[in-house]
Amino acid sequence: MHRLPLAAVLLAAAVLLTGCASGDDWSKPRPSPSAVGALGAEFIGTKASPAPESTVTPRPGSWAGVRPSPGMRVVLLTAGADRPTKTLVTAVEEWAEDEDVALRTVTTSGPADLLPAVVRAMDLRPDLVISAGNDLIDPLAAVTPSHLAQQFLIVGAELAEPTENVTAVDWTGASFRGEGLGASSTYDPASFTGPRCAAAVRAGTAAVLSGHTGIVVWLDEF
């Protein structure tokens, strides 16, 4: 049987180990991701740049021309096992697979773990944290103003007073804003359909990648 020289075996092992480390290590500095493509003119309307906390109602599909540059790192932060949250999680996972995004998931273990889970997500130093689950809204409201360098995208809910690093995507039937606060529409779990959640993830990430952050993207049509 033919045997490779020991030096060749060691070199091959070193290459494999180096490749795995570089692919898995998110702590190393690297260029920030950018938008590949551009939003359609109907995404933000006549506004050159929407004001913070404002709401835009993009034309369906006006976000379709934007995708992330290679190597974007995203953490999916999720809480709850209800059907709307599961549908959102699936939408994020499918988007990440389609766009070759490096995705890691942080799942809360219960009410006492909500705030620690937000911290764990930030500690991974992702380019974007995508939140799915109404239970995360109050912890995010407490944490995000003190971490303006970290971008967040909330899908199917929103913060009552978002800072410039928190973007949300909502629609009629979603828009939970935290305990004790009213929503801009009556909560309807049935409104969290697969197509709507998929459109929300793509519209929200397109907004963030294009620099339109701190706003609410409203998707009643998609």
Image (tube, helix red, strand yellow):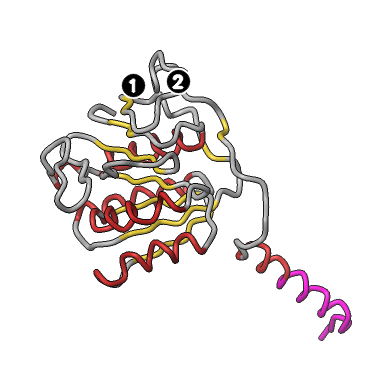
Image quarter (top left, top right, bottom left or bottom right) of the C terminus? top left
The residue under label 2 is 40
The residue under label 1 is 59
Give the numbered dot on residue 18. Answer: none
Q: In percent of the image, x 59 and y 38: which residue is there? A: 34
Query: Residue 189 versus residue 79: which sits nearer the camera?
Result: 79
Q: Residues within 10 Å of mark 1 (few under 14, many from 20)?
A: some
Q: Compared with residue 76, is residue 34 higher up or lower down, i.e. above or below?
A: above
Considering every residue shown, the one lying at the far bottom of the view is 1
Considering every residue shown, the one lying at the far top of the view is 46
What's the magenta region?
A: 1-17
- Pinpoint residue 95: horizontal percent, then vertical percent: 42, 46
- Pinpoint residue 99: horizontal percent, then vertical percent: 51, 44
Q: Compared with residue 81, is residue 165 higher up or lower down, i.e. above or below?
A: above
Tag 1: residue type?
A: Arg
Q: Residues within 10 Å of mark 2 (few under 14, many from 20)?
A: some
Considering every residue shown, the one lying at the far front of the view is 146
Q: In percent of the image, x 49 and y 53: which residue is there? A: 74
Tag 2: residue type?
A: Gly
> Disc 2 vs disc 1: Cβ atoms closer than 8 Å?
yes
